[in-house]
Image (cartoon, rainbow, N blue to C red):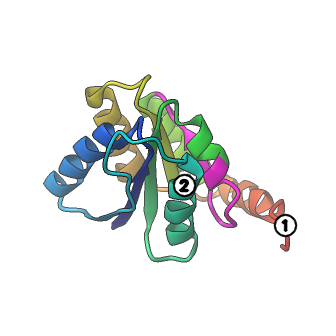
Amino acid sequence: MRIALGADHAGFELKDALKRLLDGMGLAHHDFGTDGPGSVDYPDFAAAVAKGVSEGAFDRGILVCGSGIGMAIAANKVPGVRAAAIADAESARLSREHNDLNVLALGARLTSPDLAEAIVRSFLDTAFAGGRHTGRVEKIHKLEPGT
């Protein structure tokens, strides 16, 4: 599994902690930045990660900003991306099983490193259930412009 990572200035420290988690899990990843506390615009990083997932270069994406909300909104503008700001491991599991979530957004100001690890593990370890959920995900895809 290949993971794309991105964060703004509020999320870069948590992103770096998650890189160590991914290393420990033996998962390949690419960091699209940012790498410091200097103010940056989160849509730039959301777009890079979302495009990587949408184009198939990465299997999943993880974004981190202050709340996770702005990253999720921006990522969802990219066709083929299903992103959500997730605050607990059960929501991560359900978003994968039912919605085939492919981009996880986390809020560094709202999520402890331990909770973020549990959320990421659930996001990465849970498969899409398919079945009755497949048609629903296809309906979401049909809402995208040009489909």
Q: Quadrant of the N terminus?
A: bottom left
Q: CA distance from mark 1 to mark 2?
A: 19 Å
Q: Residue at x 61, y 54 (%)?
A: 75
Q: Is residue 82 left or right of residue 119?
A: right
Label 2 neighbour load within 10 Å: few <14, some 14-19, many 20+: many
Q: Residue at x 14, y 52 (%)?
A: 24
Q: Quadrant of the C terminus?
A: bottom right
Q: Amino acid at mark 1?
A: Pro
Residue at the far front: name it.
38
Q: Residue at x 50, y 70 (%)?
A: 52
Write the start and end of the magenta stretch as one range: 74-87
Task: Say which of marks 1 and 2 sits in front.
Answer: 2
Q: Amino acid at mark 2?
A: Ala
Mark 1 falls on what kind of element?
loop
Where residue 122 sits, quadrant-wise, is top left
**What residue is shown with label 1?**
145
Residue 39 is inside the magenta segment:
no
The earlier-in-sequence mark between 1 and 2 is 2
Q: Is residue 136 left or right of residue 111?
A: right
Q: Nearer the viewer, residue 113 or 1?
A: 113
**What residue is shown with label 2?**
46
Mark 2 falls on what kind of element?
helix
Position of 51 relative to 34 (above/below):
below
Residue 33 appears in the figure: yes
Horizontal and vertical percent position of residue 127: 45, 55
Horizontal and vertical percent position of residue 5: 39, 56
Residue 126 appears in the figure: no
Classified by dominant secondary structure, the portion drawn in magenta counts as loop
Q: Residue at x 31, y 38 (%)?
A: 14
